[in-house]
Image: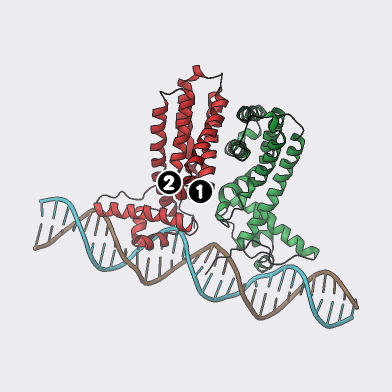
Chain colours: A green, B red, C cyan, D brown
Amino acid sequence: MARQLLTNPRKHAAQARSRATVDVLIETTARILVREGFDRASTNRIAEQAGVSIGSLYQYFPGKDALVAAVIDRHREELGNVTRSALAKASNQPIKQAIRTLVAAAVEAHRIDPRLHRVLAEQIPRTGRLEKVETFSRENYTLFKAYLERHSDELRALDLDLASFVCVTSIEALTHSAVLHNPAMLADNAAVKALIEEATRLIVGYLH
Amino acid sequence: MARQLLTNPRKHAAQARSRATVDVLIETTARILVREGFDRASTNRIAEQAGVSIGSLYQYFPGKDALVAAVIDRHREELGNVTRSALAKASNQPIKQAIRTLVAAAVEAHRIDPRLHRVLAEQIPRTGRLEKVETFSRENYTLFKAYLERHSDELRALDLDLASFVCVTSIEALTHSAVLHNPAMLADNAAVKALIEEATRLIVGYLH
DNA sequence: GCAGAATATGAGCGACCGCTCGTATCCGCT
DNA sequence: AGCGGATACGAGCGGTCGCTCATATTCTGC
């Protein structure tokens, strides 16, 4: 039997109680992903822990993938807010300061819910096989490129596409790897500062 | 019932035919991982497609995880060969040339079996039983740090641990992302050259 | 208050999972 | 040749999976 591939909600929740059901399902899915991992996040288990019947779950989500997709969307929204506001702030700053702002924002974004972020980043590509996860950083890429365009007079001659790829990929990898694979980093403010400093130096040096 | 946690072979294969059985199981596992993904790689399916009975599979592997671990080890061995020889070659080169050698090697390593590499990197659950997969880049990190130590007189004052982390993580992310998320890159030699050039510039600029 | 729409329920089906174990076959050694 | 260990086999057990559907409950509009 073909597995369910759809990730769209099956039905729109209209009344307040059904919206509550949807919410608790998404929240429970996130909690199970964090606490038990992707494999143990079965629809039966999610429904049970959410205090919702399996039938109700399937009224709103066509399957596990849709639940996970909803969790991803919610998380990405939060990340996007942090990044977008940082980019707005950076747009008026000179290069070096702007890069520092962006790197700091990247670290900040990874602090929102690191354990969930880790599960999503590491276990989720199995869902959908789509570019859904690639879009994780696509927006960052586009916005960063726009920044470079506006400030191209302060930079050496650059292939903006290639440069955006290099910068965004590096910043993403450094913050992701540092924050997620070394949880102690979260507490150690000095270490965070050092990381931001190094990443800034890396990027600024590259752009000049 | 508690899931199987071991990833070590259950029994050592002594005769030639059993070694052949083990080989075909590992190879089939790799093939299924690439063609069907981690989730569909069940022990039953692996045994069937390998032309080996499920009983024989369990003579040599305590479960799916052990098979996957064997695939990972084999792949990592191949990557390690490329990287180690590049590092040996680089150890006598000046910084800029050395970095270029290493970046080129990183790209080369990602060309070995990109689809398998992608599956291993993206689909293997790293939380839990297969956690030791994190050592994927640990060796690179150590070797790179050793290189920096030997050439520290050519560099600015550096925290070698931090610098190694920054360099290895960036190179890994750039080559990985470029080669795996843009398969056209494999064919386009000019694009590969451009990537190597940019990554080299990024790292060299950072180290100086 | 009541009809009908929206929402919630959960037993249970068929498929597949990981894995065992009793049995059959093959191979190396004397 | 023939014995004993190594190897191979596969039916099938107990379990979880994703998911449906007949039924029950709650809400909304009139």
Badge 2: few (under 14), some or many (20 or more) residues near its Cα, within 10 Å? Answer: many
Instruction: Report the quarter where the C terminus of chain A lies.
Output: top right
Q: In the image, what residue type sits under mark 1?
A: Ala
Residue B105 seen in render? yes
In the image shown, does C1 or B158 lie closer to the viewer?
Answer: B158
Secondary structure of residue under mark 1:
helix
Name the subunit of mark 1: B
User: Height in image: B146 above or below A46?
Assistant: above
In the image shown, does B72 or A32 lie closer to the viewer?
Answer: B72
* Residues at marks 2 and 1, CA–CA distance in whole angstroms: 25 Å
Comparing labels 2 and 1, the label whose residue is closer to the camera: 1
The mark found on residue B184 in the picture is 1
The image quadrant that residue A62 belongs to is bottom right
Q: In the image, what residue type sits under mark 2?
A: Ile
The image quadrant that residue A9 belongs to is bottom right
Badge 1: few (under 14), some or many (20 or more) residues near its Cα, within 10 Å? Answer: few
